[in-house]
């Protein structure tokens, strides 16, 4: 058999991984080392060389987009469809599994998925029903508590409050939440995984079937798996030694949402005969960027270890800019972006500004606007998360499953039909008392004439609408059904009258939803599937995806977490200061500090050709002016790899241990000089502008913070 098409495009380490014979394989794939290529070629090897059938391969990706791209690349390489292969995210695969075994899992056949926003809204309603104050029991905190427990495989019944009042209340809410979801036939994202794991664990016959079927289990981004995902993999694999895991412990940055870097770090202990392959050749960044990143991440003591290298040249040094303040930082970055586009021929979309917190983006946006540079804040609201789309989908969900409380309440009065908050609260109460769905309580209220005439009439119209649509569900295509539901719902007329100026956009989005349904049905591989149910699941899973699209030629702004998996010729990692990066919540916890360092490593390795690190010597945080120390991460970079773009007031450059010459300000003062003002007291010179009688100087005073003073009248003196 000629295996050259599979192996020839690969380097030696990649070939070793792709052609590994038998047993579990752990591929430690460094940033930019071609891990997706390895996964695709490994699957091709399994199908062509080891003669596995597509339906005996399960591949887990981190995003739905990655799953689509992987399937397309495999089919292109093999020149044949691989429709039977299970390729998708953990949530997508768990959903597929539960659809096939809905009865065994104790679910209604048409169960629906709650995305994060729907789950949040449900929890808010539940808190109101339980008469709990949101100020004391924040819905986001409750949502996080429930999801974290599910990620750990824990039901409310498994938890012990230990006599703690907070824990008692949280468990009570969790219990009510579970009952509400069961009654409505809905599953949140965490429940998909937990329910799938429980079914595999408790049904040996089903477990045996899938262990026999899947002869190869491949996982991408293994370092980002959580406890329940790893447990699910172990159940599926058993003692078959058929795991092929690709990940990088140096890029594990999602501990705050349940990912456990320990999964990849302890895998060799769990599976002692694992073959480990390191992919260290980088195809993205220059030698200097890689050397700096290697030096940084070497300070994490628990890492498995690898050293990135490249056959390309050293390239430019890493450049460090010490800004006077956050405004100066934003101006500098925007100006360097302008120069890169004007002088180096970069496209705007090839320039990325990365920051630790979303609040940092505002000043960069302002600075870019002042220079006329269009930009995009990455990770904005995606199509299936828009209000008008979620409204239309809620109507479709009621067609599939009218017991869905989240969908019912969302559109009960959208468009407005005279159903007020008091009526909704009454229906919630009736549903809770009767332990039934909102839809059932609504119908019972109509039968028993429990509500005022106006509310009764409005509710009867709503019930008739949903009933009529359900009876007419047998449309030729999914797109026809979607269009009929949108038109019958009254949403188009409702949005046409909207006064927020977005009516046309919303109508166009509803048209796009019909097109999305048309495309989805055309690409639906499973002929047995219910098109509507499959489309609703697709929409919910896409709303929960972590990636965003966008191909306009605009400057890219994003958090460091959002940057993972991306690459840009020009990258700015900004705000590299103690308390901001590493974040103040992490500096006292060794494991969290390691994750912050990994996050910095991820940011640095996004850069292909030029990398800037910036920090501000003063920054306004929490309503007051502060003078943060440069980040410890800067001190961990080799001095010979970093070039100071501007000298600054601190005697030594943070991280390089060499002195910087002070820069001239104005009036004989230099940046960093200690000065005294007769009214404001002692301070430090930060900046200056202008010349002659119009010269101004910026001083950060110990007592009153930063002030700009006209030098001719400032009466400043050097401090003793």
Image (cartoon, rainbow, N blue to C red):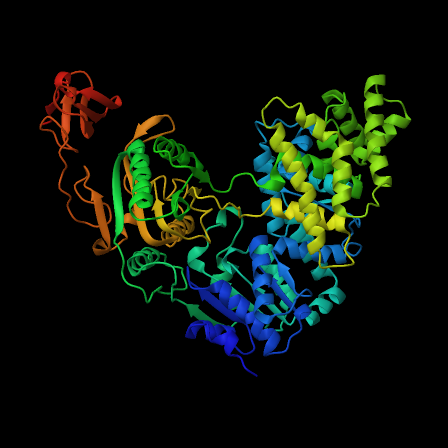
Q: Farthest residue toward the right?
A: 447
Q: Position of residue 94 (x, y in %)?
A: 67, 56
The residue positioned 33% from the left and 35% from the top of the image is 330
Residue 136, quarter of picture: top right
Of 447 and 681, which appears nearest the observer? 447
The reply to whether residue 308 is visible in this rendering is: yes
Q: Position of residue 289 (x, y in %)?
A: 31, 56
Relative to 234, 535 lies left or right = right
Q: Quadrant of the C terminus?
A: top left
Residue 390: give x, y in percent of width and height. 67, 37
Q: Can you name the residue that lies furthest to the bottom here?
A: 1
- Residue 273 in view, yes or no: no
Q: Is residue 461 left or right of residue 55?
A: right
Residue 556 occupies quadrant: top left
Please state, as top left, top right, bottom left or bottom right, where the N terminus lies in the image: bottom right
Q: Is residue 105 left or right of residue 246?
A: right
Viewer-side residue, 403 vs 588: 403
Q: Is residue 222 above or below residue 50?
A: above
How many numbered markers are drawn?
Answer: 0
At x 78% / y 38%, what residue is drawn? Answer: 484
502 is higher (above) or lower (below) than 511: above
Instruction: Find residue 604 and report its horizontal and vertical position in percent.
Output: 36, 52
The quarter holding residue 46 reads bottom right
Left or right, 428 with reference to 65: right
């Amino acid at each position: 058999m000629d295996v050259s098409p599979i192996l020839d495009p690969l380097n030696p380490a990649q070939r070793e991984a792709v052609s590994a014979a038998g047993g579990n394989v752990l591929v430690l794939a460094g940033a930019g080392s071609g891990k997706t290529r390895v996964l695709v070629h490994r699957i091709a090897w399994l199908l062509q060389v080891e003669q596995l059938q597509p339906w005996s391969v399960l591949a887990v990706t981190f995003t739905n987009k990655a799953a689509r791209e992987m399937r397309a690349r495999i089919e292109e390489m093999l020149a044949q469809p691989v429709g039977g292969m299970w390729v998708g995210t953990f949530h997508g695969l768990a959903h597929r599994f539960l659809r096939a075994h809905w009865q065994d899992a104790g679910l209604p056949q048409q169960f629906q998925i709650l995305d994060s926003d729907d789950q949040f809204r449900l929890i808010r309603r539940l808190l109101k029903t339980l008469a709990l104050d949101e100020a004391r029991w924040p819905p986001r905190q409750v949502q996080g508590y429930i999801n974290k427990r599910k990620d750990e495989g824990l039901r409310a019944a498994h938890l012990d409050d230990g006599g703690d009042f907070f824990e008692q209340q949280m468990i009570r809410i969790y219990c009510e939440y579970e009952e509400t979801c069961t009654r409505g036939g809905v599953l949140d994202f965490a429940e998909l995984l937990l329910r799938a794991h429980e079914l595999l664990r408790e049904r040996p016959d089903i477990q045996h079937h899938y262990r026999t079927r899947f002869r190869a289990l491949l996982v991408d981004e293994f370092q980002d798996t959580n406890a329940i995902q790893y447990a699910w993999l172990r159940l599926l694999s058993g003692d078959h030694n058929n795991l092929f895991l690709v990940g990088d412990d140096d890029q594990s940055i999602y501990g705050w949402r349940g990912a456990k870097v320990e999964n990849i770090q302890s895998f060799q202990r769990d599976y002692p005969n694992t073959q480990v392959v390191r992919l260290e050749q980088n195809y993205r960044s220059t030698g200097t960027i890689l050397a700096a990143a290697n030096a940084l991440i070497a300070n994490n003591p628990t890492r498995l270890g690898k050293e990135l290298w490249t056959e390309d040249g050293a390239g430019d040094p890493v450049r460090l800019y010490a800004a006077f303040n956050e405004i100066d930082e934003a101006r500098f970055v925007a100006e360097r972006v302008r120069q890169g586009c004007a002088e180096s021929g970069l496209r705007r979309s090839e320039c990325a500004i990365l920051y630790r917190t979303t609040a940092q983006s505002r000043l960069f946006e302002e600075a870019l606007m002042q220079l006329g540079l269009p930009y995009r804040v990455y990770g904005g609201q995606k199509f299936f998360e828009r209000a008008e789309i979620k409204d239309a989908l809620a109507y479709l969900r009621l067609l599939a499953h009218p017991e869905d409380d989240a969908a019912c309440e969302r559109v009960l009065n959208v468009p407005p039909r005279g159903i007020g908050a008091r009526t909704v609260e009454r229906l919630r109460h009736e549903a809770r008392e009767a332990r039934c769905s909102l839809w059932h309580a609504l119908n019972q209220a109509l039968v028993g004439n429990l509500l005022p005439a106006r509310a009764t009439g409005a509710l009867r119209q709503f019930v008739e609408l949903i009933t009529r649509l359900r009876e007419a569900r047998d449309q030729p295509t999914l797109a026809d059904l979607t269009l009929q539901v949108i038109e019958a719902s009254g949403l188009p007329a409702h949005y046409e009258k909207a006064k927020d100026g977005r009516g046309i956009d919303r109508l166009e989005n509803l048209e796009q939803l019909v097109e999305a349904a048309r495309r989805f049905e055309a690409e639906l591989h499973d002929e047995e599937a219910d098109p509507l149910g499959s489309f609703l699941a697709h929409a919910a899973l896409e709303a929960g995806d972590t990636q965003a699209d966008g191909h306009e030629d605009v400057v890219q702004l994003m958090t460091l977490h959002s940057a993972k998996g991306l690459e840009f010729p020009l990258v700015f990692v900004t705000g590299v200061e103690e308390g901001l990066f590493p974040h103040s919540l992490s500096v006292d916890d060794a494991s969290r500090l390691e994750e912050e360092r990994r996050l910095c490593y991820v940011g640095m390795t996004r850069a292909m050709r030029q990398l800037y690190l910036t920090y501000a010597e003063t920054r306004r945080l929490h309503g007051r002016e502060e003078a943060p120390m440069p980040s410890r991460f800067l001190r961990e970079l080799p001095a010979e790899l970093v070039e100071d773009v501007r000298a600054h007031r601190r005697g030594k450059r943070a991280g390089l241990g060499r002195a910087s010459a002070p820069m001239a300000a104005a009036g004989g003062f230099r940046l960093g000089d200690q000065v005294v003002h007769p009214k404001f007291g002692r301070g430090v010179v930060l900046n200056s502008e202008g010349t002659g009688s119009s010269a101004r100087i910026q001083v950060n005073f110990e007592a009153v913070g930063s002030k700009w003073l006209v030098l001719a009248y400032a009466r400043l003196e050097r401090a003793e």
